[in-house]
Amino acid sequence: QVQLVESGGGLVQPGGSLRLSCAASGSFFVINVMAWYRQAPGKQRELVASVSSTGTTNYKASVKGRFTISRDNVKNTVYLQMNSLNPEDTAVYYCYTSTRPYKEYWGQGTQVTVSS
């Protein structure tokens, strides 16, 4: 079983920055993919960014150049640095991970609100 604990959400003005963190703990063999998803009111959950165990990253087109995903494999933690935030980034952000043996886990979600 894996627990994902997220932190770093909040209220920020347009153009501002936030850094999300998600730490994985529990019993597992290997953490594979770590990722951030988000879900805005009335919309489906969507992938924002992901990073593989070897460091390969993938980004949603609208966040490329503004968001950076990174991971610390010693701490089993994934980060999402979000810059140049705009109101369209407002959503609940969820941490995701898959493990070996294969299982998927989700964090509880953290609210990010971009508003003046």
Image (cartoon, helix red, strand yellow):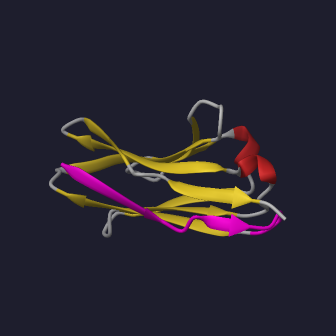
User: Is 15 in the magenta?
Assistant: yes
Query: Exactly how many numbered labels are in the figure?
Result: 0
Q: With 100 as the anchor, is 47 left or right in this view?
A: right
In the rendered view, would you say 74 is above or below 108?
A: below
The residue at the point 37 percent across, 50 percent down is 53
In the rendered view, would you say 61 is above or below 76?
A: above
The residue at the point 34 percent across, 63 percent down is 73
Q: With 105 as the anchor, is 8 left or right in this view?
A: right
The stretch of residues the image draws in magenta is 1-16
Q: In the image shown, does 87 or 25 lie closer to the viewer?
A: 87
Residue 20: image x %, image y %? Answer: 54, 64
The residue at the point 29 percent across, 50 percent down is 31
User: Is 19 in the magenta?
Assistant: no
Q: Is residue 101 visible?
A: yes
Q: Quadrant of residue 72?
A: bottom left
The residue at the point 65 percent across, 38 percent down is 41
Quadrant of the drawing holding the C terminus: bottom right
Q: Is residue 56 visible?
A: no
Q: Quadrant of residue 102?
A: top left
In the rendered view, would you say 72 is above or below 91?
A: below
Residue 12: image x %, image y %? Answer: 73, 68
Residue 71: image x %, image y %? Answer: 44, 61
Q: With 101 as the anchor, is 99 left or right in this view?
A: right
In the rendered view, would you say 94 is above or below 60?
A: below
